[in-house]
Each structure stands twice: as C-alpha cells, then as structure tokens.
Image (cartoon, helix red, strand yellow):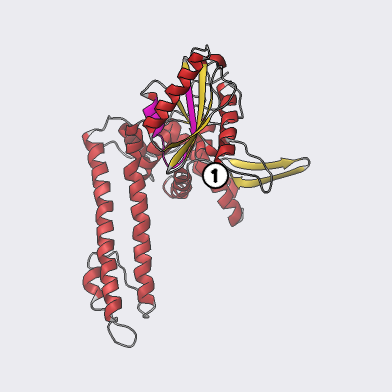
C-alpha cells in the first residue's frame, strides 16, 4: 500500500493525452528543456538562457501547441535533477500552478558501459524515461526529493555556517602551529584569549624572535582566527536566544526535548532536528536510510559480501551520529543501547567495535526520532531536569 509521503512513485493517475511532461537539464549559463507534448509526435528540445521567465513562456507555448493539435492540457509536470540551484525553481513553478519535482540524481539508472556517451541531449532522454515511469506510478525509475519551504531551508543555515566556520578555525590553527613548528617553536596555543600578546614574546631555540615577515603573517592569522571565533560565538548566542524567546515555535520544541538527553548538546540537537528529525519520514527504515547508516550488500550467485555503509543519505547526520554514538557510551552507560553495544563487543577487536558503533548510531538515531515524534524515552536514558 503506497504511503502518503512516498516519493519513489507518483500517487496521481497519469493521463498522457492531457499532461505536458517536461524535463530540464540545468547548468550555470543555460538550460536544455525537453518535452513530451500531447498530440505532437515530435519531442521538442529547446536550449534557453538560465531564466525562469523564459522557461514559463516555453511551457505556455508548448501548451498552446497541444491545444492546436486538439488536446486539452490540464496538467503540466516539470522535473529536473537536484544540484547547485537547489529548490527555488520548483517553488517558483508551483506558485504558478505548475507541478514541479526535483529528482535525486543518483536514483536515475545509467548505462554501465565503460565509456558511455554523455551529453546534455542524452541526459534529457534519460530524465524523460525516468520521469515518465515515475508519473505512471512504477517503482524503481527514480526518486524525488522533498521540496522544502524557504523557511525550512533557512533554518538549516546557522548550523551549516557554524560547521564551515569551525572547519576554517581548525585550518587557521593548524597553519599557525605549522608555521611555528618550522621555527622550532612548540606548545603555543593560538585559541587562548591572550595568545596575540604572547606571540611577541616567542623565541626560537636559538634565542631569537621570529623573523619579521613570519611574525606579520602570524599576526594576520591570529586576527583572522579571532574574527572567526567571534562569528561562531555570535551564531551560538543567536540560536540560544531564539530558543528562549520562542520555545514552542516550529522545531524549537524538538530541539529542547532532544537537548534534555544527557550527552546531547544544543548544537547536536539543532543539527539533527533541522537536518532529519523534522522531516516527514514514514518509518524507522526511512530514518536510517536518509542518514546513510544502512549497509550496501553485494550479492551475486554464491558470493555474499558487505561493501560497508551506503553513504547515500545526509553526510552531516551520518558524521554527527557516529560521533554522538561514541559520546553516548560515555554519558549513558546504563542505557539499554549502551548495554547492547558492550554485550556484543566485550571480547571483540577494534575493527569489530568500529563496525558495531555504526549499528549503535543507527539504533540511537531511530530512538531519538521516536523521542521527538512520540515522546517515548529510550529505555535507561537519563534526561536533564527541565529548566
């Protein structure tokens, strides 16, 4: 029985005589638009500038051609692959009464030839076949991405910006340490509050201060580091302020509930809620699959082997959950999940523990999903006292 949010096939019946089917191969400077027009034998292919108004005019022109051929177009279905442009075009088309879908690029089957021809024209043919099968309600042709609202996309930006800033902070710190290591200076901590003042007092093993050009470079890096750290603190303060001012608004309730679990910080809770837990996922298998924490079996004849994680889902959630699983073992030692992990790794090697931590991360993610959606607290998990 199809689920209400099943994006692997269309739940609406397809009447091809009254449906204009269009796919778009998008690039930065131009769009290649291919269509299947009711009543027209030819399947037109049109190259446009990357402009939504030109696309809308082309759709209306093809609809008029179908009308002249004696067909009444009651449905215009447009699809394109997920990519750099995101979801803005799908939202823009939907506000103008056009059915728009975004295809997961990895879900479209391609030829397995070692050197297959690949052009934009051939790609539109692949998209047309996949999209047409999806509209007919057949499984396995392609999968559609859920199109978020502008508010939902915007809610992810603070966490993703902070992740980028933390990576930049690490790069700057490593660059400063490597610069000092070339001079034989070790033990300097650039993240300390008084690190810029201590920089001038550094001496090489020969007893000489750092050369002037190197010292100027270090001071610029220190200034850049102070600026990045300030931006990270600004993002964190703004998030806490939003949670305190609007505790019951949107996904804030989920974040606060998740942050009550000892071992789960506000940063991790905010990432999990906005990246996965607030999505309308139909069951626990969909939760694990979206995080990329499911396996990738390789079976052919008598051969049976596991290629590791599928890694087809959200990489941020996957990395965050594996880190949280290790932390969970420290802060929730008496929980049922921690006991399950210890029972299976008591006499195991390190490689086995690394494998089982992925299984723990998968189970933990499903448990947290049930916590924020149904309020069911995982067995043995200790919560912080409500503020």
Q: Which quarter of the picture shows residue 177?
A: bottom left
Which segment did they paint magenta? 76-93
Between 142 and 343, the one nearer to me in the picture: 142
Residue 182 position by quadrant: bottom left
Closer-to-camera residue (26/30): 30
Residue ID at (34%, 65%): 173
Residue pictured at 48% horizontal, 27% vertical: 78
Helix, strand or loop at mark 1: loop
Q: Does residue 204 appear left or right of residue 2 in this picture?
A: left
Q: Tell me which residue sits at (25%, 59%) in the image.
A: 227
Local crowd size for mark 1, using a 10 Å CA cut-off: few (<14), some (14–19), many (≥20)? some
Left or right: 158 in relation to 344: left
Q: Position of residue 311 (x, y in %)?
A: 54, 44
| Residue placed furthest toward the front | 68
Find residue 334 and report its horizontal and vertical position in percent.
46, 43
Report the residue marked by disc 1: 311
Q: Is residue 382 in the magenta section?
A: no
Residue 332 is at least partly visible in this image? yes
Q: Quadrant of the C terminus?
A: top left
Is residue 265 among what the camera can see? no
């Amino acid at each position: 029985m199809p689920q209400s949010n099943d994006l692997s096939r269309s739940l609406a019946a397809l009447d091809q005589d009254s449906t204009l089917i269009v796919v778009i191969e998008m690039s930065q400077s131009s769009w290649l638009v291919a269509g299947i027009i009711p009543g027209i034998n030819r399947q037109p292919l049109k190259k446009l500038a990357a402009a939504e108004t030109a696309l809308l005019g082309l759709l209306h022109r093809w609809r008029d051609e179908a009308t002249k051929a004696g067909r009444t177009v009651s449905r215009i279905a447009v699809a394109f692959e997920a990519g750099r442009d995101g979801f803005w075009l799908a939202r823009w088309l939907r506000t103008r009464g056009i059915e728009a879908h975004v295809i997961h690029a990895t879900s479209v089957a391609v030829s397995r030839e070692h050197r297959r021809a690949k052009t934009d024209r051939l790609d539109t043919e692949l998209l047309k076949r996949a999209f047409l099968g999806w509209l007919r309600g057949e499984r396995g042709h392609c999968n559609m991405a859920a199109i978020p609202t502008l508010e939902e996309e915007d809610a992810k930006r603070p966490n993703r910006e902070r992740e980028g800033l933390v990576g930049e902070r690490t790069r700057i710190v490593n660059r400063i340490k490597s610069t000092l290591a070339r001079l034989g200076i070790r033990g300097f901590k650039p993240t300390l509050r008084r690190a810029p003042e201590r920089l001038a007092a550094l001496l090489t093993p020969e007893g000489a201060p750092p050369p002037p050009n190197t010292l100027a470079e270090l001071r610029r890096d220190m200034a850049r580091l102070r600026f990045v750290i300030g931006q990270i603190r600004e993002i964190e303060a703004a998030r806490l302020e939003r949670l305190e001012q609007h505790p019951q608004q949107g996904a804030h309730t989920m974040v606060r509930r998740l942050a009550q679990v000892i071992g789960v910080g506000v940063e991790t809770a905010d990432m999990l809620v906005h990246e996965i837990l607030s999505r309308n996922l139909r069951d626990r298998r969909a939760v694990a699959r979206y995080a990329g924490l499911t396996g990738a079996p390789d079976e052919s004849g008598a051969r049976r082997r596991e290629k590791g994680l599928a890694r087809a889902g959200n990489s941020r959630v996957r990395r965050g959950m594996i880190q949280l699983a290790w932390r969970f073992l420290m802060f929730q030692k008496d929980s049922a999940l921690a006991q399950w992990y210890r029972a299976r790794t008591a006499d195991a090697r390190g490689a086995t523990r690394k494998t089982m931590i992925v299984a723990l991360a998968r189970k933990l993610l499903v448990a947290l999903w049930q916590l924020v959606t149904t309020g069911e607290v995982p067995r043995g998990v200790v919560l912080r006292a409500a503020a």
